[in-house]
Image (tube, helix red, strand yellow):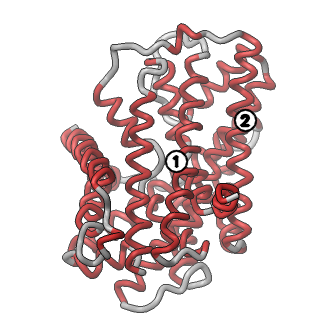
Amino acid sequence: MLLRARFAQVGPGLILAATGIGVGDMVGGTIAGAEYGLTLVWALAFGVLIKLAITEGVARWQLATGTTLVEGWRETLPPVLVVGFFLYFIVWSYMVASALVAASALVPAAILPAVPLWAWQVVHALAAFVLVWLGRYERFLQVMKWFIGLMFGSIITATALILLWSGADWAATVPSADFSVTYTLSLIGGVGGTVTLMSYAYWMREQGWAHEADLPAARFDLLVSFALVFFFSFSMIFLSTQITWTGQILDEGPRLCLVLADRIGEEIGAVGRAIFLVGFWGAAFSSVLGVWHGVPFLFDDWIHVWRRTQPVGQRGTAYRGWLAYLTLAAISALVIARPVWLVFAYTVTGSLFFPFVISTLLWMNNSHRLPARARTGLATNGVLVGALLVYLYLATRSITG
């Protein structure tokens, strides 16, 4: 009965899973399965564990102190670091908004090629804007639950059809001793999400979790969330192992998923292709919705923390202003080329985001500002230190490369 009650409370984690499971996870899973079989499942599991530890740290700080992580930064860090994060946040929002909308438009453009790709991008950006502008948290949660079902249902169905139609190729799943260290670490670091992990704090607040006593509920919520992330990514890896690939697999970004859909169509027919495309679209557009809903909370928090006023929330000017910014950024990217300096700035600052967040969590969640019972345990600290080493390596590769 207790377990059933806990599952009934699950909410913010489902939104986080629907947002974090995106096209990047599908592309990463496709390449991992095609090139390495099930060799890198351990890396996937470690990556999920890292993101779980980071998000739990964000929740722990907020529930134990009554303040958000951004508020904690404002009170404990030099202003230059807080402003630096905000500048990165502006660039990140622009780059991610345009990339997510572009990925979402690929499926309808493939189904109805007579309608240009840019038109589908505009439709998806505006649809997300309207849904978030008009929708309350409870309604948004129900929408994201529907997307979770859509994504998992389509990927599992496509995999089952391949197994029934062609039979399982278990030889393709055999782990290989030959794998790239850099790619493995990239898979570890890339699963789940980035800045959107911080949105969990605000979805948690909308859920009504505001006290240290709510931490067990948040932990269970996050366990469900990242179990879904792992299961979906594993399904993509396994599905990719069952496809007959010809030639070298090229990382074509989101378009690789269209290639995978075509391969599925060749193996089991148009129905299988359509089912997979539905799941691809669900993963892409649910990420748009999650970013459009969660990221403006972060901007609203930052603005009011800096002014030392109380955040207003979803009906406030700051929230709605950033919602409009995300939408306009996605649309403007259709006609304005990204400057080289902007791409470079995004790459460099983005590579430093997780080292920054993990370092502050290790410091703040082990500080005297938290009661001893709420401080991070040895196991979680160990995971975070391991995560810090992984992201520092990836940051070095990204900057020097």
Q: Residue at x 72, y 46 (%)?
A: 149
Q: Residues within 10 Å of mark 2 (few under 14, many from 20)?
A: many
Q: Residue furthest bottom?
A: 309
Please name the amino acid that badge 1 sits on.
Phe
Determine which quarter of the picture holds residue 233: top right
Whether residue 133 is visible, yes or no, is: yes
Q: Residue furthest right?
A: 271
Q: Residue at x 57, y 37 (%)?
A: 231
Whether residue 345 is visible, yes or no, is: no
In the shown orientation, is residue 278 left or right of residue 202? right
Going from the N terminus, do you reach mark 2 or mark 1 first? 2
Q: Residue 350: x, y in percent?
A: 32, 53
- 387 is higher (above) or lower (below) than 12: above
Q: Looking at the rendered structure, which numbered label has been put on residue 260?
A: none
Q: Residue at x 23, y 78 (%)?
A: 76
- 22 is higher (above) or lower (below) than 167: below
In the foreground, 374 or 339 = 374
Q: Are marks 2 and 1 in contact (CB under 8 Å)?
A: no
Q: Residue at x 61, y 9 (%)?
A: 169
The quarter in which the C terminus is drawn is: top left
Quickly name the residue at label 1. 226
Please name the amino acid that badge 2 sits on.
Ser
The quarter in which the N terminus is drawn is: bottom right
Distance (Cα) linking label 2 and label 1: 19 Å
Q: Residue 134: x, y in percent?
A: 72, 74
- 283 is higher (above) or lower (below) than 36: below
Q: Looking at the rendered structure, which numbered label has been put on residue 154?
A: 2
In the foreground, 301 or 93 = 301
